[in-house]
Amino acid sequence: MKKIITYGSFDLFHEGHYKILQRAKALGDYLIVGVTTEHFDRKRGKLNLVDPIMTRIENVRATGFADEIIVEDHDGQKIEDIQRYGIDTFVLGSDWVGKFDYLKKYCNVVYLDRTPNISSTIIRNDRLKLIKLGIVGTGRIAKRFFAETKFVSGIEAVAAYNPETVSLENFSSAFSVMSFSNEYEDFLDVVDAVYVASPNETHAEYVRKALVAGKHVLCEKPMTFTYDEAVELYSLAKNNKVVLMEGIRAAYLPGFQQLLSVAKDGTIGEICDVEACFTRLGDPQSREMSDARYGGAFMEYGSYTMLPIFKLFGTEYEDVQIDSILGETGIDRFTKVQFRYKNGLATSKTGAGVKSEGQLVISGTKGYILAKSPWWLIREFDVRYEQADRIDHYEAGFIGVDGFRYEIAEFLGKINGTSGIDYKLTAEESVAMAKVVEKFMNIRRKQQGF
Ligand code: CTP
């Protein structure tokens, strides 16, 4: 019996998929089709799958060509499958010519011509309206963000807004987008969604106006400085039926999702303590190092350190203690926030102009998780136990720069209704962060003597 194997995502099943399965089957007697998981596809850079895996499998099954369907979920699996199933011929479309020649050691490798003018990407783009994105603020972070929008299909940055014209002109000529420096409403008119990356103290107002105008919003952290305002903005988004998402990038990374799952699945027993640290020795002239009202360690990095705490222990803490050491400019140079939960403790440590080990440690009754710096751009972590030589190592890399791609894909998925319910960063968690920020600001103001 001649066995054939082929692989694919088979998203939004189309004629090209049907024909390749038909031709693959005709090459032998028994066809095995590997359908990729969402997780594996994300790792490979496909961030916009529409159909869930069960639908994709059912669509392959419905063709009647597959004798067996398997799931592909990890690198190196093709070699394993070929050996395990005794495959004679590996088949893939001509878009992959050469890419799988390394499998020739194990079986025949055949690339079949692709069906012209059709692909999942084309259907996705036709089916879902292209989202026109506007960027508010044109500084360092906006530039890095803009470059990454190019890698997520279905969204295009078309306009930038900044009342400061020099920065705006530099940005819009470098990236060929429309520029707006006066009327924010005119800018909102030409977009469907906005990414707010302006100075911290201007976030909330830009967000509010965009939501009122019916635009979807992705806002850099911290979105607001008060609990009331955070509640107001999320309910405004809900009433206007638009997406509001706080841009805490770590929340959307595949490795962070995996870390949370491992932490919660009992591997380390009951979680007793979470300690998250983020410090940076930045440029003393920078806004975060010099702006005594809206800069400083906790404002800049506290959203990151609070994230694993709220994800693991929830937002209902019994008590929170905040203490800071101020620098010469009046900013908090180092801030320690301690949360007390019914059955757990948590600490957030942030530094701007102080350096420490930027790690995330989750301690449990059977072991602990250690994610080393930069855990907010997580690629790997360890689970360690009483026996020092027993270490389970997890790797979950990501593609692109600084995790923006996953955040943008999540934002787009929410706009299109394809990314499921909110769980990576909920409105409730974002609101709880604003509550801590509010308390922090009150304490810091007193300390500063304002
Ligand atoms: N395929 C094909 N003809 C097409 C599209 C895809 O023969 N017009 C083949 C691919 O070469 C591959 C298989 O179908 O062997 C599954 O491809 P998949 O990546 O799932 O589909 P695409 O439409 O190429 O998806 P995307 O646009 O997301 O890359």
Image: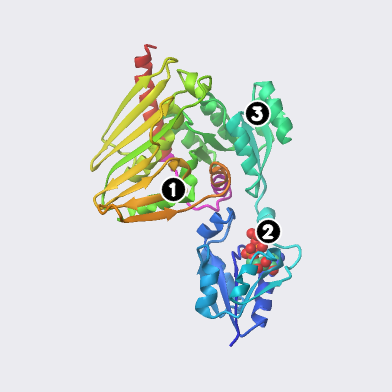
Q: Earlier in the sequence, mark 2 or mark 3?
A: 2
Q: Residue furthest right?
A: 116
**Identity, as a three-letter code, of the amino acid under mark 3:** Tyr
Q: Are marks 3 and 1 in contact (CB under 8 Å)?
A: no
Place of residue 230 in the rendered image (x, y in percent of width and height, measured from the top left): 44, 32
340 horizontally vs 422: left or right? left
Please tell me whether mark 2 sits on a helix, a strand or a loop. Answer: helix
Rounded to the nearest whole Å, what is the CA distance between mark 3 and mark 1? 32 Å
Residue bearing mark 1: 256
The label number, if any, that marks residue 123 in the structure image = 2
Residue 211 occupies which quadrant of the picture? top right
Q: Nearer the viewer, residue 239 or 78?
A: 78
The label number, if any, that marks residue 206 in the structure image = none
Disc 1 crowd, CA 10 A, few/some/many (<14, 14-19, 20+): many
Place of residue 73 in the rendered image (x, y in percent of width and height, measured from the top left): 50, 64
Place of residue 362 in the rendered image (x, y in percent of width and height, measured from the top left): 32, 45
Q: Residue at x 65, y 32 (%)?
A: 188
Q: Is residue 182 visible?
A: no
Residue bearing mark 3: 161
Mark 3 Cβ inside 8 Å of ligand 1: no
In the figure, 152 relative to 146: above or below? below
Rounded to the nearest whole Å, what is the CA distance between mark 2 and mark 3? 32 Å
Residue 31 occupies which quadrant of the picture? bottom right
